[in-house]
Amino acid sequence: MGKIPLDEAEAGKEAGPGNGTERGDPGRSGNLADAGASGLALPPAIETQMIGGLSIARMTRLDLARLMARDAVAARAGDLKLPRFVTSANGSIVAAYHSDAGLRAAMDQADLIDADGMPLVFASRIFSKTPLVERAATTDFLLDAAALAAREGISFYFLGGRPGVAARAAEHLRSRFPDLKIAGVRHGYFTDAEEPMIISAIARSGAQILWVGMGTPRQEIFAARVREALPGLAWIRTCGGLFDHYGGGVSRAPYWMQRLGLEWLYRAAREPVRLGWRYLVTSPLALYHLATKTRG
């Protein structure tokens, strides 16, 4: 089990002399309404463990929301040199990580990878001495993050999805969290030639958290590539098809299927042509890597 220092100052301190669920309900993560200013405190390092060959953060959704808020404060003060690159992993990502060199190179640059899939939680329970506390589903985490962001004045930027989807997702969140600041939205269909203009627009927007939902591996490669062009941001957070759930009319699996790690089956049944073959191929690979590359 490893640890990721939260910032350079704390990394130096630790190494110095003498220092050796209704959806959106935080559930086991706790109540964000109780996580006031004093609730933003975090341990000096993020514990990680190897699951399926990836270094996965042992954090609840509430932990992630607190870290986001703390990083936003640091970014405002100019104490965060570059945005934190935060991404997630599920079974499909585990399989792709070991077969796609471009994705692997990008994810190896991430500052934090959380467990977005129940298969990772199950693998940690079977093969680890210290299993993960919970699944940090990105679709649920967005609501945790939005609740805290609305209270702390943290602004979001949504990049990704089909034209109009990110904008509808933004409106949905504003209806649920009236004080939430969304500095801008942009669909994910753009050319390489348009990228500098988009990066400039994000930088000018004043957003602190950039949510990138462009699908794997494009979003991870994009996040790793552009982070140095976006100083002043706190986070670049990849989020896959998140905007579709809140602005594109795509439903989630029933809660019991989520709990049993069967959300992939629900998706495959709804989109058999696009997703059925993918899951038939990736699921056995994911199981292999989870069974042979999980420890801690």
Image (tube, rainbow, N blue to C red):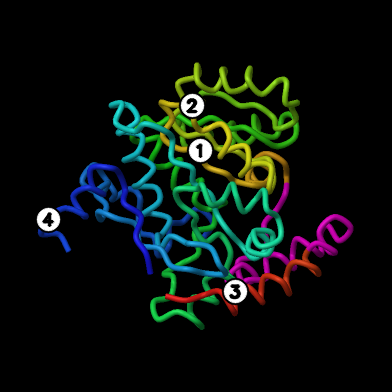
For mark 1, give the secondary structure: strand
For mark 3, give the secondary structure: helix
> How busy is the neighbourhood of tag 2: few (under 14 within 10 Å), some, or many (20 plus)?
many
- Type of secondary structure dominating the magenta stretch: helix
Mark-to-mark CA distance, 4 and 1: 34 Å
Q: Nearer the viewer, mark 4 or mark 1?
A: 4
Sooner in the amino-acid sequence: mark 2 or mark 1 = 2
Q: Is residue 217 left or right of residue 119?
A: right
Sooner in the amino-acid sequence: mark 1 or mark 3 = 1
Q: How many marks?
A: 4
> Mark 3 = which residue?
290
Sooner in the amino-acid sequence: mark 2 or mark 3 = 2
Asked if 95 appears above or below 163 in the picture, the reply is: below
Image coordinates of residue 89 in percent, x first then y, are 58, 58
> Mark 2 = which residue?
230
The quarter of the picture where residue 28 lies is bottom left
Query: Are dots 2 and 1 in contact, CB under 8 Å?
Result: yes
- Which residue range is magenta in the image? 250-278
Q: Nearer the viewer, mark 1 or mark 3?
A: 3
Query: Are dots 4 and 2 in contact, CB under 8 Å?
Result: no
Q: Residue at x 55, y 37 (%)?
A: 211
Asked if 282 appears above or below 141 in the picture, the reply is: below
Indicate whether residue 289 is drawn in magenta. no
Amino acid bearing label 1: Ile
Mark-to-mark CA distance, 2 and 1: 9 Å
> Mark 1 = which residue?
236
The quarter of the picture where residue 238 lies is top right
Amino acid bearing label 3: Leu
Mark-to-mark CA distance, 2 and 3: 34 Å
Q: Residue at x 26, y 49 (%)?
A: 11
For mark 2, give the secondary structure: loop
